[in-house]
């Protein structure tokens, strides 16, 4: 299982709030997704099974360095498809197959550093008019909806009703307590650490689900959906990327941490 957060080596390079999230997960065959993992990482498994997640949420107050949110560009809707990874050093993380976003400047900047953001029209409803990390007490019984559409035709419509708080299972901790991101840039495998408080998780009933984002990411679930979850969110901070495997032909980059 993923360990407790290791703590970041300073400086903090990104600081953001992940608000009002739904977690939808399906089992997948690790062998069927292994080709999607960056150099030095592989599918993270529980009892021989890995998982794919579909996670819609609201990004708020995102910015560079600590407590420096970027006006307008730091607030947006996002829906991501993600896999679960571990590297040769035992560092756990996620591998994003896609991150749909309604801010084209964010998409361009993220793709430049190897994070597969995509332009999409996204709408959401049901958010209360308060900070995302303060809404847990007023969320019980409320409904959330997200719609996503890319120009390619890939799309999703997701609806959930928020239920009571739950104590997560070991598997649910495995899927939500991820302390980094594995990615690849110019052939170089990277692990970027993050830290955040423990999730407050609620059970959630899926009231509507029509999507092909998972299939568009080249992933075929191998079984039924796990228990859906919802969270009011957390504050997350990211540190400097760490080298996982560096081809000898590439020069060392000063912004990487060994």
Image (spheres, rainbow, N blue to C red):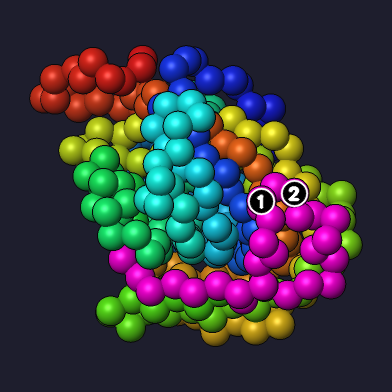
Determine which residue is flagged by label 2: 134
Determine which residue is flagged by label 1: 131
Q: Nearer the viewer, residue 94 or 112?
A: 112
**In this view, 237 is above or below 106:** above
Question: Is residue 93 in view?
Answer: no
Q: Nearer the viewer, residue 99 or 86?
A: 99
SS state under label 1: loop
Q: Quadrant of residue 118?
A: bottom left
**In this view, 188 is above or below 165:** above
Question: Is residue 145 in view?
Answer: yes
- For label 1, count other residues whose C-alpha is less than 10 Å away and answer few (under 14), some (14-19) or many (20+): some
User: Magenta stretch containing residue 130, yes or no?
Assistant: yes
SS state under label 2: helix
**In this view, 202 is above or below 254:** below
Q: Is residue 195 left or right of residue 232?
A: left
Task: Tell me, yes or no, whether the two marked residues, 1 and 2, touch with CB atoms within 8 Å.
Answer: yes
Q: Residue 225: x and y, percent?
A: 67, 71
Q: Nearer the viewer, residue 146 or 53?
A: 146
Q: Is residue 257 left or right of residue 46?
A: left
Residue 104: mark in rendering: none
Q: Residue 201: x and y, percent?
A: 78, 52
Quadrant where the N terminus is found in the figure: top right
User: Magenta stretch containing residue 9, yes or no?
Assistant: no
Specify the segment rendered in magenta.
119-145
Q: Nearer the viewer, residue 77 or 128?
A: 128
Residue appearing at x 63%, y 34% in the figure = 196
């Amino acid at each position: 299982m993923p360990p407790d957060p290791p703590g970041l080596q300073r400086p903090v390079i990104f600081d953001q709030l992940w608000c009002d999230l739904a977690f939808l997960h399906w089992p997948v065959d690790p062998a069927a997704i292994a080709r999607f993992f960056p150099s030095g990482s592989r599918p993270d498994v529980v009892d021989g099974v890995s998982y794919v997640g579909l996670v819609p949420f609201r990004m708020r107050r995102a910015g560079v360095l600590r407590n420096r949110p970027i006006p307008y560009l730091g607030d947006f809707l996002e829906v991501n498809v993600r896999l679960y990874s571990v590297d040769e050093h035992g560092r756990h993380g996620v591998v994003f197959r896609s991150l749909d976003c309604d801010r084209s400047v964010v998409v361009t900047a993220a793709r430049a550093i190897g994070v597969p953001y995509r332009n999409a029209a996204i709408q959401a409803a049901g958010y209360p008019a308060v900070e995302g990390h303060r809404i847990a007490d007023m969320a019980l019984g409320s409904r959330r909806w997200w719609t996503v559409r890319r120009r390619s035709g890939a799309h999703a419509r997701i609806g959930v009703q928020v239920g009571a708080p739950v104590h997560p299972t070991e598997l649910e901790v495995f899927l939500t307590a991820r302390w980094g991101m594995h990615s690849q840039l110019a052939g170089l495998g990277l692990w970027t650490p993050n830290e955040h408080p423990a999730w407050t998780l609620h059970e959630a009933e899926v009231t509507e689900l029509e999507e092909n984002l998972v299939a568009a990411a080249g992933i075929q679930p191998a079984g039924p959906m796990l228990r859906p979850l919802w969270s009011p969110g957390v504050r997350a901070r990211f540190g400097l990327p760490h080298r996982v495997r560096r081809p000898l032909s590439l020069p060392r980059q000063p912004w990487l941490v060994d």
